[in-house]
Image (cartoon, helix red, strand yellow):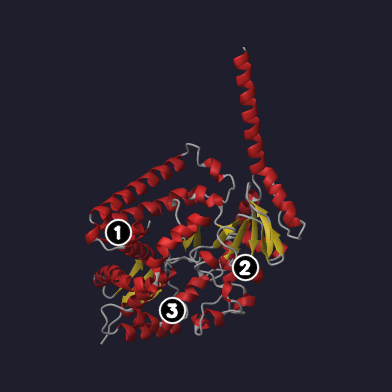
């Protein structure tokens, strides 16, 4: 009897602790953060228990999703209408909730600049990303903070210096040639022009480049890994609704969770197989994966501004003439092509927001941000801010970058396609080299125009993508 009573007492204590822990996560911690920020004048929509503002977000999206003008480059009102509504109501800095998370949205230039001054140990990646996206990103550079982040970046960073990128250009050329030859064969069959849904080809091209760089002669297995990762991305995007309780949902035996767990295990085993092969044949495989082991998306075409595209084509023709491989010097000469890429990344940044978590109390501008607050920076709003970019911010005008990013807008930190501060994307040099090579080669071979079937409908699937694909009319260019 005494043992039973003791067991009951222990169970009651454990249950009480569990309830207090849940209450703290789901409500008390959020209330403390809201009080501290509201005392400083930060406003926002009133949250509800458990759901925060998620129901309101869905309602706003349903009511306003058809309000966007067709053909415009400003698609915030379609994907994130609640951001626009709340910014108009509360200003460039406001607070909202997704249940267990309090999110401070920041688009004020001075506060955005301050974000870059804090280290990843102070203002790092949110813990919820590590939990909810673990299957996709693992415990890598994207989600780690503090010493582990610094350790991983120290190992990987040298592999993305420009002297290493030089050695990867041939890999990019090889992958690009495969796409060019495939399109040429398709177009030859139909007399010079054909509709091609290009986004899948370009996505696969990027995966091919990374697979060749990381896995060397095992790049076919690398392609299989990226195919699985693409399936993982879609599965996670379907269940990701910005709900702060996502860390709890992943333990439920739902169909989507089972699919994610299965894909996660398949990817892990494939990577282990390749790593074992590289270790066994280390002398004959000189690739990126070896270097990392030894040390420890989205391309889009805009069919507007045809005159500028023709100038880019003429430049590409001149630089590529007689070159089987573009070297670093040739890439530097692609100034107009670079401007086209920079402007496209401004209007269509692959990642729509930057997310950080205050791992300690931090100060942004005049605001004291308490520990545990999620700081969210909407890239789209920064890139389309007319005070920073001018009245033509919504327009595709690559020549704004003629004298570099610093001259293109009032503040360089308002251009963040690759992030901002210490966590700026480590692979941006490789990404820009790939974009320059691919775009230059495509422009010398093909002329593009929108297909009649094209529907301008950007979609959010963890990254920004064409909602209904990107069908273009591709015509062979006849050169003398």
Q: Measuring from the top left, give residue 448's x and y in whole percent.
A: 38, 75
Residue 416 position by quadrant: bottom right
Q: Residue at x 63, y 14 (%)?
A: 2
Crowding near the residue tagged with mark 2, few <14, some 14–19, many ≥20 C-alpha atoms within 10 Å? many
Question: Which residue bears the numbered disc 3?
Answer: 338
Residue 96 can be seen in this image: yes
Left or right, 478 with respect to 46, comes to left
In terms of secondary structure, where does tag 2 sit?
Answer: helix
Q: Which residue is mark 1?
A: 215
Q: Residues within 10 Å of mark 1 (few under 14, many from 20)?
A: many
Q: CA distance from mark 1 to mark 3?
A: 28 Å
Q: Position of residue 81 (x, y in %)?
A: 61, 61
Secondary structure of the residue carrying tag 3 is: helix
2 and 1 marks in contact (CB < 8 Å): no
Name the residue: 66% across, 36% down: 20
In the rendered view, would you say 381 is above or below 58?
A: below
Which residue position is annotated with label 2? 112
Depth check, mark 3 against mark 2: the one in front is 2
Of residues 105 and 186, which is closer to you in this image? 105
**Mark toward the start of the polypeptide (2 vs 1):** 2
**Position of 105 compared to 262: left or right?**
right
């Amino acid at each position: 009897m005494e043992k039973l009573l003791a067991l009951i007492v222990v169970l009651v204590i454990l249950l009480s602790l569990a309830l207090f822990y849940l209450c703290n996560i789901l409500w008390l911690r959020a209330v403390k953060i809201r009080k501290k920020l509201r005392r400083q004048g930060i406003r926002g929509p009133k949250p509800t228990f458990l759901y925060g503002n998620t129901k309101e977000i869905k309602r706003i999206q349903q009511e306003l999703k058809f309000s966007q003008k067709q053909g415009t480059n400003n698609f915030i009102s379609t994907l994130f209408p609640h951001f626009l509504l709340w910014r108009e109501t509360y200003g460039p800095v406001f607070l909202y909730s997704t249940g267990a998370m309090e999110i401070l949205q920041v688009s004020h230039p001075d506060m955005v600049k301050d974000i870059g001054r804090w280290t990843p140990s102070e203002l790092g990646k949110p813990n919820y990303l590590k939990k909810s996206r673990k299957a996709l990103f693992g415990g890598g550079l994207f989600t780690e903070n503090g010493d582990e982040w610094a350790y991983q970046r120290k190992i990987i960073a040298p592999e993305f210096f420009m002297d290493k990128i030089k050695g990867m250009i041939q890999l990019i050329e090889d992958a690009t040639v495969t796409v060019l030859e495939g399109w040429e064969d398709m177009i030859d069959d139909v007399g010079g022009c054909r509709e091609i849904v290009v986004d899948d080809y370009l996505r696969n091209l990027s995966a091919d480049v990374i697979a060749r760089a990381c896995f060397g002669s095992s790049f076919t297995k690398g392609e299989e890994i990226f195919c699985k990762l693409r399936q993982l991305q879609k599965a996670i995007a379907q269940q990701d609704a910005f709900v702060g309780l996502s860390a709890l949902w992943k333990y439920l035996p739902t169909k989507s969770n089972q699919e994610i767990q299965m894909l996660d295990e398949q990817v892990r085993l494939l990577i282990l197989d390749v790593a074992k092969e590289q270790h066994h044949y280390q002398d004959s495989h000189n690739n990126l994966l070896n270097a990392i082991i030894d040390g420890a998306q989205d391309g889009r075409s805009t069919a507007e501004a045809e005159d500028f595209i023709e100038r880019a084509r003429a430049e590409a023709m001149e630089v590529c003439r007689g070159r089987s491989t573009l070297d670093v010097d040739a890439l530097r000469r692609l100034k107009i092509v670079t401007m086209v890429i920079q402007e496209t990344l401004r209007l269509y940044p692959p990642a729509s927001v930057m997310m950080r978590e205050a791992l300690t109390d931090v100060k942004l501008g005049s605001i004291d941000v308490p520990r545990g607050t999620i700081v969210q920076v909407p890239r789209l709003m920064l890139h389309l801010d007319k005070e920073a970019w001018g009245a033509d911010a919504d327009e595709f005008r690559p020549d704004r970058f003629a004298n570099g990013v610093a001259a293109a807008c009032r503040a360089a930190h308002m251009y963040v396609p690759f992030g901002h501060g210490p966590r700026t994307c480590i692979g941006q040099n490789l990404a820009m080299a790939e974009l320059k090579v691919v775009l230059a080669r495509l422009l010398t071979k093909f002329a593009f125009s929108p297909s009649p079937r094209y529907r301008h409908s950007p979609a959010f699937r963890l990254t920004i993508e064409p909602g209904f694909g990107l069908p273009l009319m591709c015509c062979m260019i006849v050169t003398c």
